[in-house]
Image (spheres, rainbow, N blue to C red):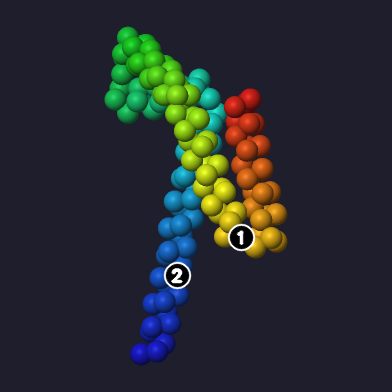
Amino acid sequence: MKNSKAVVGALLVFLLGMAAGVLGTVGMARHRWMHRGPRVMADFVVRRLSWELRLDRAQRSQLRVIVNDGWEEMKAVHEQVRPQVEGILSNSEAKVRVILRPDQQGKFDKLIAERKAKQAQSKDG
């Protein structure tokens, strides 16, 4: 009985690890696509829907306009809420910093700096 529990436990850990890996990979791939820019993302959406829905040339052309317009609208909304999001992040960072020991605060500051650098890089690139 103990042996079967160990096997089931090991199998469960393996399956959960595999599921976490798959979800992490999918999330990372989606994140990378989103930060490559509107042109790449729009092309991907148009190609995918064109293939899946078997769109004709006129439909593809109309879809490209719709996707580009949607991207511009999302970009405008993002710019409107950016200050609020940055304020929430700063507030949360300050709250986290309060609960950290001095040795942890240095590491936390490094993590925050890395996140900000990646954000700046994705804006530029």
Going 45% across and 70% down the picture, which residue do you hit?
A: 13
Relative to 78, say whether 114 is above or below. below
Mark carried by residue 9? none
- The residue under label 2 is 13
Residue 121, can we see it? yes
Earlier in the chain: of badge 2 and badge 1, it is: 2
Going 52% across and 36% down the picture, which residue do you hit?
A: 86
Callout 1: SS: loop
Observer-nearest residue: 2 or 52? Answer: 2
Residue 80 at x, y percent in the picture: 45, 24
**Figure quadrant of the C terminus:** top right
Going 59% across and 27% down the picture, which residue do you hit?
A: 123
Q: Which residue type carries mark 1?
A: Leu
Residue 7 at x, y percent in the picture: 42, 79
Mark carried by residue 100? 1
Can you tell which quarter of the image residue 112 is in?
top right
Residue 44, can we see it? no
Viewer-nearest of labels 2 and 1?
Answer: 1
Observer-nearest residue: 62 or 105? Answer: 105
Residue 64 at x, y percent in the picture: 39, 15
Residue 28 at x, y percent in the picture: 51, 43
Q: CA distance from mark 2 to mark 1?
A: 31 Å
Going 43% across and 64% down the picture, which residue do you hit?
A: 16
Relative to 21, say whether 114 is above or below. above
Q: Is residue 111 left or right of residue 2?
A: right
Can you tell which quarter of the image residue 67 is in?
top left
Observer-nearest residue: 50 or 66? Answer: 66
Callout 2: SS: helix
Q: Which residue type carries mark 2?
A: Val
**Figure quadrant of the N terminus:** bottom left
Q: How many marks?
A: 2
Q: Residues within 10 Å of mark 1 (few under 14, many from 20)?
A: few
